[in-house]
Amino acid sequence: MTMWNGTSTVGPRRCLDEKPRRGMARDRATDRRLLWETIFLLAVSLGQSAWYSILRMIERLTRGVPMGKQTSTLNSSVTPGRPWLDLLYQLSDIAFGVAPAMLAVLLLVQLRPPRQGVRHALGLEAPGWGRDVGAGAMLAVIIGIPGLAFYWAARALGFNTTVQAAELQHVWWTAPVLIGLAGMNAVLEETVIVGYLFTRWRQIGWSTTTIIVTSAIIRGTYHLYQGWGGFIGNIAMGLFLGWVFSRRRRLLPLITAHAFLDIVSFLGYAYLAGRVSWL
C-alpha cells in the first residue's frame, strides 16, 4: 500500500521544480531511516530470537540425535530451591519482555506517526474491545485445533522436538506467572511483529503481500528452535494473522488469540504432563 508521503503536486510542471525533488529526497531518506529503525528494533527483540533460533537449529542438526528424540523446554525455573527468588526472576522476565513492544509504540508516536494516530493505526480504539476479545477467542480456536494436530504429526514424523511448555516448580504462584508469561508473549509478538512492522513497512511503501509474508517468515524463524514443525506452523499462523490484521486493522484480537493459545499450552502442560500420554 502506498502511503501519503508529505509532499504535494499541483500540476505536471510542479513535479519538475527543484523544491519538490528535495522534498521527495528527504522522504526517501526518512524511509531509509524507518527501515533501519525496524531492523534495529528487531535486533534487540524478536530478530535476535530468530538469529539464536537458527543457531539452535544448527546445533540440533549436528547433535547426532534425531530431532524427534530431542526436547525444547519453555518457562523453566531458574532457582527451583528458592521459590521467592524464582518468582522475582519470572516477574522480571515478564516486565522486560514487554519493553520492546512499548518501545515500538513509542517510536511510532515519536517518529513519523500515522496521520490518524497510533491507536487508530493499531486498531486499539474504543469502543469495540469486547468484540475484539470475542474475535480473539474464535481465532484461538481456529488456530489452536489444527495447530495442535500439526504439532503431533510433525513430532510423530520426527520433524519436531517434544515441546515442554512449562517446567516451573509447582508453588502458589505457578499459574498466575504462566498466565503473565503468556500475556507477555502475546503483547510482545503481536505488537512488534504485526502492529509495529505492518505500520512502518506500509509507511515505507511495501505491498500488503510483502509485509504479510516477511512478517510471517520472521515469526516462523524465531520458533525454529522447536524444529521444522514449529517453523512451518508459525509461518502459517503468521500468514493467517497478518491477513486478519490487514483486513480488520484491529490488533487486540491477535493479542487475545495469542494469549489464549499460550495460556492453554502452558497451564495444560504444567498440570497434565505425566498424566496424559500425548503430552
Image (cartoon, rainbow, N blue to C red):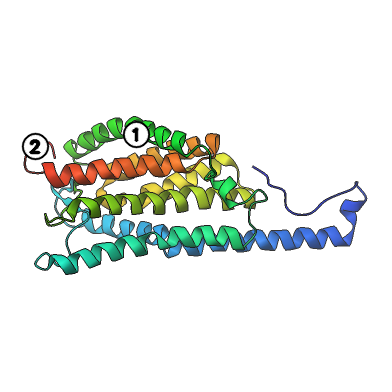
Quick one: 44 or 251, which is closer to the camera? 251
Can the viewer see residue 108 in this picture? yes
Quick one: 236 or 257, which is closer to the camera? 257
| Amino acid type, callout 2 | Val
Where residue 144 sits, quadrant-wise, is top left
Disc 1 is placed on an element classified as: helix
**Residue 168 horizontal side relative to residue 98, left or right:** left
Which sits earlier in the primary sequence, circle 1 or circle 2? 1
Checking the image for residue 276, the label placed there is 2
Can the viewer see residue 160 in this picture? no
Mark 1 and mark 2: Cα distance apart in space: 22 Å
Residue matched to label 1: 143
| Amino acid type, callout 1 | Ile
**Residue 234 horizontal side relative to residue 149, left or right:** right
Disc 2 is placed on an element classified as: loop
**How far from the left and from the top, in percent, is residue 27?**
72, 59
Q: Assign the C terminus to one quadrant of the image.
A: top left
**How far from the left and from the top, in percent, is residue 14?**
90, 52
The residue lying furthest to the right in this view is 13
Q: How many marks?
A: 2
Identify the residue shown where x is 24% and y is 37%. 151
**How far from the left and from the top, in percent, is residue 60?**
22, 55
